């Protein structure tokens, strides 16, 4: 088996696939990339058993075969080459020889047959969505997903497809983000929970892509097909919590404020907050918002006054500044609205502007109890 491929082209594809490979694998074969050659098409795959991703590359060859090559060694070698053609030749003594303009390098390979086969989806449902919209939906929600192994359903992003639109939800019980697109629809109603790892991979690849992504899914797996790549992953098993029930419907107190100003103020004041609770206090009266924090153990405190547009009763409410900062960071609006009902009920943060047609973002943040 022999093929010729551009060094930078190969490296670019392998770096994307390398994101699938775990640092410590139970099966040694998973430390490798699977190279499958069929004429001038080379398909390279990487897997961690839960997620498998493959990309098809154009190479110069007219042969067939499959081998598994050590991923780390190959990536480290390719990073050092300037752009040039590399020739891969499989030798009889179980090594692959790579020839560059300046030298030869031999790597031991494993038999491609040992590599786990990718899952085939039986009778999947199908939806097509633009890569850019999917990447936006992932980046707007994934930061709010939890890390708790005891509650695996909350450690992913909930996809809800219907004939009216697509909804993506993530929550860790302290904060929740719901992202809706009404300009994209699916043929039938479907719900599934996607794990974080494949979503992060997709987000990275699709951010700069205007390609369409075909999503196929059944009860246990989902498959994403775009450009020259395919990603198959196992879904998180379980029932997603009823998130609509926690979004308060009646919120008479509405605060509208410049997002950047609010974010910078929260960041500054939170430096003086307690290091375990990260608690900041918002005190709203008339057109003035007072943001304060205090760390009693060290006698540190800070407060800032901002002008805002506020309709509602005067109130004080406490939030974890880290959650508030993350949310404000993830909105790209000039102005945001914070809706509240009572100091012990969740606040709802929404962008006032900066949204596309048919796009909606609702962020919910739980308050923390204030020590008066």
Image: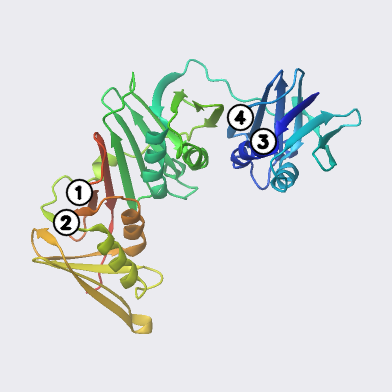
Residue 196: % across, % down: 48, 42
Q: Mark 1 or 2 closer to N-term? A: 2
Q: Residues within 10 Å of mark 1 (few under 14, many from 20)?
A: some
User: Label 1: which residue?
Assistant: 352
Can you tell which mark lies on residue 54?
4
Q: Is 351 or 157 nearer to us in this picture?
A: 351
Residue 349: % across, % down: 24, 52
- C-alpha distance separating marks 3 and 1: 44 Å
Q: Mark 4 or 3 closer to N-term? A: 3
- C-alpha distance separating marks 1 and 4: 40 Å
Instruction: Look at the numbered discs 3 and 1 and tell me whether their residues touch, using CB distance below 8 Å.
Output: no
Callout 1: SS: loop
Relative to 361, residue 56 above or below:
above
Quarter of the image that includes the N terminus: top right
Callout 2: SS: strand
Q: Mark 1 or 4 closer to N-term? A: 4
């Amino acid at each position: 088996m022999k093929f010729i491929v551009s060094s930078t082209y190969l490296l670019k594809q392998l770096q994307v696939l390398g994101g699938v490979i775990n640092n410590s694998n139970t099966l040694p074969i998973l430390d490798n990339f699977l190279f499958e050659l069929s004429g001038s098409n080379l398909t390279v795959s990487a897997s961690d058993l839960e997620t498998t991703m493959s990309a098809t590359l154009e190479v110069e060859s007219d042969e067939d075969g499959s081998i598994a090559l050590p991923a780390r060694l190959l990536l480290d070698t390719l990073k050092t080459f300037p752009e040039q053609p590399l020739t891969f030749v499989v030798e009889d003594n179980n090594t692959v020889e790579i020839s560059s303009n300046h030298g030869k390098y031999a790597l031991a390979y494993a038999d491609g047959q040992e590599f786990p086969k990718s899952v085939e989806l039986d009778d999947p449902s199908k939806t097509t969505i633009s890569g850019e919209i999917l990447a936006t939906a992932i980046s707007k929600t994934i930061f709010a997903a939890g890390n708790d192994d005891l509650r695996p359903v909350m450690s992913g992003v909930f996809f809800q497809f219907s004939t009216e639109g697509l909804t993506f939800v993530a929550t860790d019980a302290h904060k929740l983000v719901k992202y809706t697109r009404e300009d994209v629809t699916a043929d039938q109603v479907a719900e599934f929970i996607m794990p974080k790892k494949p979503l992060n991979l997709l987000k990275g690849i699709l951010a700069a892509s205007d390609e369409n992504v075909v999503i196929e899914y059944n009860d246990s797996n989902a498959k994403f097909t775009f450009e020259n790549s395919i990603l198959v992953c196992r879904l998180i098993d379980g029932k997603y919590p009823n998130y609509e029930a926690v979004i308060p419907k009646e919120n008479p107190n509405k605060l509208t404020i410049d997002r950047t100003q609010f974010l910078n103020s929260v960041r500054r004041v939170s430096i003086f907050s307690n290091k375990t609770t990260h608690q900041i206090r918002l005190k709203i009266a008339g057109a003035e918002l007072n943001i304060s924090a205090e760390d009693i153990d060290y006698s540190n405190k800070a407060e800032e006054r901002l002008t805002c547009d506020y309709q509602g009763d005067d109130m004080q409410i406490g939030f974890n500044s880290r959650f508030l900062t993350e949310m404000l960071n993830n909105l790209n609006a000039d102005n945001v609205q914070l809706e509240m009902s009572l100091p012990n009920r969740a606040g709802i943060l929404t962008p006032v502007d900066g949204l596309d047609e048919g796009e909606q973002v609702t962020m919910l943040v739980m308050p923390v109890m204030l020590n008066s």
